[in-house]
Amino acid sequence: MLSENIRAVRESRGLSQEELAIKLNVVRQTVSKWERGLSVPDSDMLVSMSEVLDASVGALLGETVSEPEADNLSAIAEKLQVVDLQLARGRKLWRRLVRGTLLALAIAIVLVFACLILLGSPYSYWDFSDPELAVAGALYHGFEWAFVRIAPIVLVAAIAGLFLLRKRE
């Protein structure tokens, strides 16, 4: 019991065995023996130890010493606060990334629509007897056909996503 109390009080004060030994004018091995229960300090040493550790002799001899709960709780609260700040930064960064992606997607769709409207259907005037133009015309028409059907849905979804992300902040 004495050995456990010496160690607990020393650790709660943030002292190493070496630091306690220096303050008591003994070697570190002596403090180690006391904490392992291999030897016991004499009465004068107990009084000196109680003064250095700011604990009563009774506490060192028999009362069970527990580490202060308030210090542990405040340390845990500080760590949780740091973790919470890191998570908040991560969420903010994620929202910015998603918002930027949705905005870029909406702008790209509008620009492609504008280009398609300005170009009209240039492949309608091509001479499809040339195999290369026939393939290019078929690919261009296929892209235009798929884009005109899919892009409005994606544009509406991107705008809705931007609106929902803006509303959360």
Image: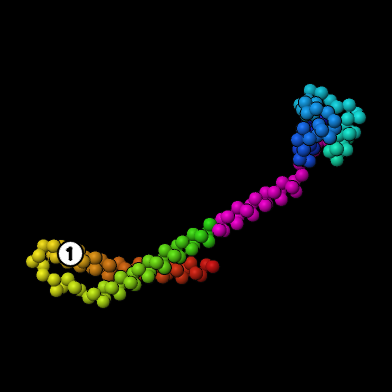
Q: Which quadrant of the figure contains the C terminus?
A: bottom right
Percent position (x, y) of residue 50? 87, 36
Which of the two residues, 160 or 131, is positioned nearer the viewer here? 131
Is 65 one of the magenta-colored residues? yes
Q: Quadrant of residue 11?
A: top right
Kindly state the secondary structure of the residue where label 1 is placed: helix
Q: Is residue 49 left or right of residue 73?
A: right
Q: Is residue 122 visible?
A: yes
Is 144 one of the magenta-colored residues? no
Q: Is residue 41 left or right of residue 165?
A: right
The overriding secondary structure of the stretch rendered in magenta is helix
Q: Which quadrant of the figure contains the N terminus?
A: top right
Task: Identify which residue is drawn at 38% across, 69% down.
Answer: 106
Which of the two residues, 111 or 22, is positioned nearer the viewer here? 22
Location of residue 76 with respect to 33 vertically, above or below? below
Percent position (x, y) of residue 97? 46, 61
Residue at the left extreme of this rendering: 129
| The magenta segment | 63-89
Task: Indicate the amino acid at tag 1.
Answer: Ala
Where is mark 1, residue-wise? 136
Task: Identify which residue is drawn at 83% across, 28% down.
Answer: 26
Q: Is residue 66 visible?
A: no
Label 1, residues with CA under 10 Å away: few <14, some 14-19, many ≥20: some
Percent position (x, y) of residue 111? 33, 72
